[in-house]
Image (cartoon, rainbow, N blue to C red):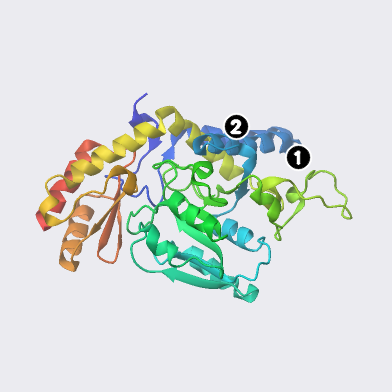
Amino acid sequence: MTIDDQFNVPAGPYLLSHSVGCLPKGAESSLASGYVEPWANNGGDAWPTWLDTVEGFCTALGELMGSRGQDICPQTSVSAAFTAYLTSLPERGRSKIVMHENAFPTMGFVVKGLKKMGLELVLIEGDADDPGLWQRHLDQTVQTCLITHVHSNTGVVSPVKEIADLCQKHDVFSAVDVAQSIGIKPVEPNAWGVDALFGSCVKWLCGGPGAGYMWVRPGHAELLEATAIGWFSHENPFEFDIRHFRAASGARKFWGGTPSVAPYALANGSLKALSKIGFSHIREHNLRLKTVALSGFETAGLTMRPAGQSGGTLCLNLTASQADGMASKLTDENCRFDRRGNSLRLSFHIYNTQAEAKLVNNILGSVL
């Protein structure tokens, strides 16, 4: 089976995997077998199969991240996960939540929404890949440092392990947002030494919206007191005794009420499809196509960062006239891409071709 046979790719070069990854064809049958069919055949007795579906997702995601599935808790979104984490932290007389100004805006909005808790948002300006810059913002007033692994508008990769080490020295909790990196960059929370991780499946994992998650470091979870709890935060959700609540151990204390199943049933199929192709192969393919797209433009300052220092997306910072011209020509070729100011964002996934990368190269050459 060819790659073309495995994905539903819209017509025209699809360069938007940093926004929404294309639906693997096998994900539809995964949704049916893991969610629809058990419901149709068993009604309320579908729960055992449904819970196996969600557990299968956590296990598969854990394998991708080099962690245990039991340390992962489903969440509706990255925002929900970050909110749940911040509201669970112990009181320490610290109010500042530090993140880079290029973090995805939702993370800053979460902190502003918690101002009644006394939390204060601190934004770092400058080079996000400079550990020294982060060092200067970490002290005894900081409760948590939110690290964006790959920044969506610049493609810059934060040195997560170095920042996490700095956080540990200052007794600052460290959390990382991997929404823009997982599936195209190695994500290794245990090796990084972070306390928590938040992510989704909608982008490079091609799993659609809704299949969010949080990972909590074993041991760290015991310090946390989840506030947005429900019956699935219980050690035994089916005990049904309103007078007796025992929080689940580890990350699962954050699960909350009746869980969503459909997003995880679909995402299971996506993880299976991508795992079969091989995530290392997908990364290598992405690097090859980015190299083709930028070939010949070194003198124009459009060089690609080393593989370890760049995300999967080409973020082309152009002049206004260049951006207008390139956007117009990409649109004429029915390319699907997006733009942030004068920066054009173009992403090559496994279903993109060398011919499409050459097309981008030709269009870029015509506007420089």
Residue annotated with mark 2: 33
User: Looking at the image, which residue is at 49% across and 31% down?
Assistant: 272
Q: Which residue lies most toward the top here?
A: 1
Q: Residues within 10 Å of mark 1 (few under 14, many from 20)?
A: few
Q: Alpha-carbon distance for marks 1 and 2?
A: 16 Å
Q: Does 100 sit above or below residue 209?
A: below
Q: Does 176 sit above or below residue 56?
A: below
Q: Percent from the top left, x then y, of residue 29?
A: 53, 32
User: Looking at the image, which residue is at 37% across and 52% down?
Assistant: 157
**Residue 347 in view (yes/no):** yes
**Callout count:** 2
Q: Does 40 sit above or below residue 332?
A: above
Q: In the picture, residue 328 is in which quadrant?
A: bottom left
Q: Does 263 sit above or below residue 328?
A: above
Amino acid type, residue under disc 2 in the picture: Ser
Of pointers 1 and 2, the one earlier in the residue sequence: 2
As drawn, is 191 to the left or to the right of 366?
right
As drawn, is 94 to the left or to the right of 335?
right
Residue annotated with mark 1: 44
* Secondary-structure class at tag 2: helix
Nearest to the observer: residue 123 or residue 108: 123
Q: Residues within 10 Å of mark 2 (few under 14, many from 20)?
A: some
Q: Quadrant of the C terminus?
A: bottom left
User: Looking at the image, which residue is at 37% across and 50% down?
Assistant: 18
Q: Percent from the top left, x then y, of residue 200?
A: 51, 49
Amino acid type, residue under disc 1 in the picture: Gly
